[in-house]
Amino acid sequence: MSTSQLATLIFTRSDNLIKVWSVDDGELVVTIETDTPISLAKWQTGGSSGGILLVTENELKIVKTSNYQYIMGVDGNFRDQFSRLIYGTRVSLMVGLTTVSLAVILGTIAGSLAGFLGGWVDNLIMRIMDVMLAFPSLILAIAVVTVLGPGLVNALLAISIVFIPQYARVARSGVLSVREEDFVMADRALGVHPMRILFRRVLPNALAPLIVQATLGIGTAILDAAALSFLGLGAQPPTAEWGAMLGQERSQIFTAPHLVFFPGIAIMITVLAFNLLGDGLRDALDPRLDR
């Protein structure tokens, strides 16, 4: 077998070793018989072990399945999958929380001004938001990242931008429902500055829907960030991000399915958790459900 040929050898530790294996000082040495023998990998023979050996042109790769040492196996670069998954949790949560925070701040300011001031300000702001909402969020995020360039920070900014209209509409609706209340009219009669009324009296009474929407948006932001990284527009190697892990190992879905299974499950569980949290907050903050 030469390195220009494609071969997949699935091996486990057993008493009947194939001819290209040899044991040397307690280590299992895997070689391929060519004109010049090539040492591909050394494995400790103590304990149970197994893996998948991939041989391609100019590339010799080991993908190790799980055992007592690597509970989720290792990837093609022999990096511990579990450690990368844990580190990816930090990256994904950072992206979700940061993008939603930026979108909530900017969207709340824009929507509050539109709802409180009304008139041409309302028309201008909301027409801009309507134009942004006319495009699917992921497509718009891809367009923004294409302009800014690939990278985790640019993906974060792109997702924040496309989320702004959602929070602007929610903030505007909340302000419209509060601005005609008696306590607001009393402040106006006393000559309180409109911006003070807006940010000290109106906006705090319109935050409940924004909190719910923000919680639900974290899961969506994590999903969109994973999609951008999967396409190569988000986190770049060697950063461990769930979407990037899926994208880097998608070609091995049939030979080493564990490399894409665990990141996919992590994304699903995290998004589901934030969706359930958002539903719970909505039920808790909805006065119509009080008993």
Image (cartoon, grey):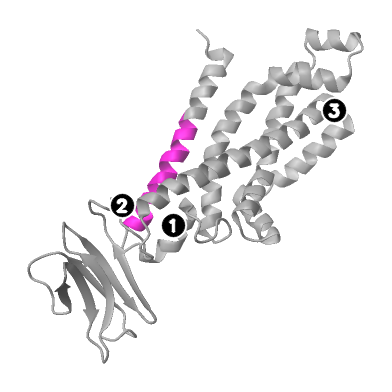
Q: Quadrant of the N terminus?
A: bottom left
The numbered mark, 2 or 3, whose residue comes first in the sequence reads 2
Give the camera-side residue of 161 and 134.
Answer: 161
The residue lying at 79 percent from left, 27 percent from top is: 115
Q: Mark 2 against mark 3, which lies toward the viewer?
A: 2
On screen, residue 55 versus residue 135, left or right, reads left
* 40 left or right, relative to 219: left
**Viewer-side residue, 291 vs 92:** 92
Q: Does dot 3 land on a helix, a strand or a loop?
A: loop
Q: Distance from label 2 to label 1 (Cα)?
A: 14 Å
Residue at the image position 52 percent from the left and 39 percent from the top:
219
How dense is the environment of label 3, judged by Cα within 10 Å: few (below 14), some, or many (20 and up)? some
Going by the numbered disc 2, the residue's amino acid type is Met
**Residue type at mark 1?**
Leu
| Marks 1, 3: nearer the viewer | 1
Q: Which quadrant of the view contains residue 66?
A: bottom left
Q: Which residues are magenta?
A: 258-276
Q: Earlier in the sequence, mark 1 or mark 3?
A: 3
Q: Earlier in the sequence, mark 2 or mark 1?
A: 2
In space, the residues marked 1 and 3 are separated at their CA atoms by 46 Å
Count of marks overlaid on the render: 3
Disc number for residue 246: 1
- Residue that protrudes farthest toward the front in the picture: 25
Taking depth in this image into account, of 98 and 184 the one nearest to the observer is 98
Q: Residue 118 shows which numbered tag?
A: 3
Residue 114, x across and y down, in percent: 81, 31
Q: Is residue 145 above or below residue 36?
A: above
Q: Amino acid at mark 3?
A: Gly
Q: Residue at x 30, y 73 (%)?
A: 54
Dominant SS in magenta: helix
